[in-house]
Amino acid sequence: MPTDFEVDAAQLILTSRWAAIATVEGGAPLASMVAYAPEPSLQGVLLFLSELSQHTQNLLDDPRVSLVVSAPDTGRGDPQLLPRATLTGEARPLTDDGEAFREAHALYLSRFPDAEMRFGLADFHLFRLVPAEIRYVGGFARAFSMTPAELAEAAVSQERPA
């Protein structure tokens, strides 16, 4: 049974769409912002990225990545108390010749229908980030790490009626 904290982390990742991505560029970190579509199980996160972006070039050279999802900052209160989750793992491009790509493509477009025309552009690639570790900070003194299996269990619990 997932803890409340694990459910909070899963809910944050499942409901957000915009995150900071950190890639490796020549041994140094590079951070930027990307849209993402989570798989319902949270066993993977989809990124649809252009080769014109440095973070995409970095992923093609080295798949190690961190993705940080945060609750929005409303401008009120202490932003250090905002819930946030960091997914660390590898993101690899999906080849467009199989069922996994077709399912990922459909999932991404269900989240971002305006992206459809970009799927016809040769410089865009659909990546699947597979988390190896998840770190969640849910506010003051509410920080912990979880495994991908624990996150997946919390995500699946969101699909069941309460």
Image (spheres, helix red, strand yellow):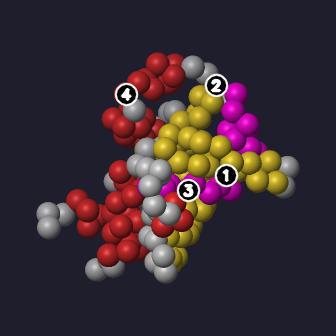
Residue type, numbered disc 3: Val
Q: Which residue is mark 4?
A: 113
Question: From which residue to which does the magenta span run?
Answer: 52-72
Q: Secondary structure at mark 2?
A: loop
Please report contact status of discs 3 and 1: CB closer than 8 Å, yes or no: yes
Q: Is residue 31 magenta?
A: no
Which sits earlier in the primary sequence, circle 4 or circle 2? 4
Q: Secondary structure at mark 3?
A: strand
Which quarter shows the C terminus? bottom left
Q: Which residue is mark 3?
A: 68
Q: Quadrant of residue 11?
A: bottom left
Between label 4 and label 3, give the one nearer the viewer.
Answer: 3
Q: Residues within 10 Å of mark 2 (few under 14, many from 20)?
A: few
Between label 2 and label 3, give the one nearer the viewer.
Answer: 3
Which sits earlier in the primary sequence, circle 1 or circle 4? 1
Q: Which residue is mark 2?
A: 123
Q: Report how far apart the C-alphas of labels 4 and 2 lie in the structure.
A: 18 Å
Q: Is residue 64 magenta?
A: yes
The residue sitting at 57% across, 54% down in the picture is: 67
Q: Report how far apart the C-alphas of labels 2 and 3 lie in the structure.
A: 24 Å
Q: In x, y percent, where is residue 64? A: 68, 56
Residue type, numbered disc 4: Pro
Q: Which residue is mark 1?
A: 22
Between label 1 and label 4, give the one nearer the viewer.
Answer: 1
Between label 4 and label 2, give the one nearer the viewer.
Answer: 4
Q: Residues within 10 Å of mark 3 (few under 14, many from 20)?
A: many
Image vertical order of residue 70 relative to residue 132, above or below: above
Q: Report how far apart the C-alphas of labels 4 and 3 lie in the structure.
A: 23 Å
Q: Secondary structure at mark 1?
A: strand
Residue type, numbered disc 2: Asp
Seen as rendered, the residue at the extreme right is 26
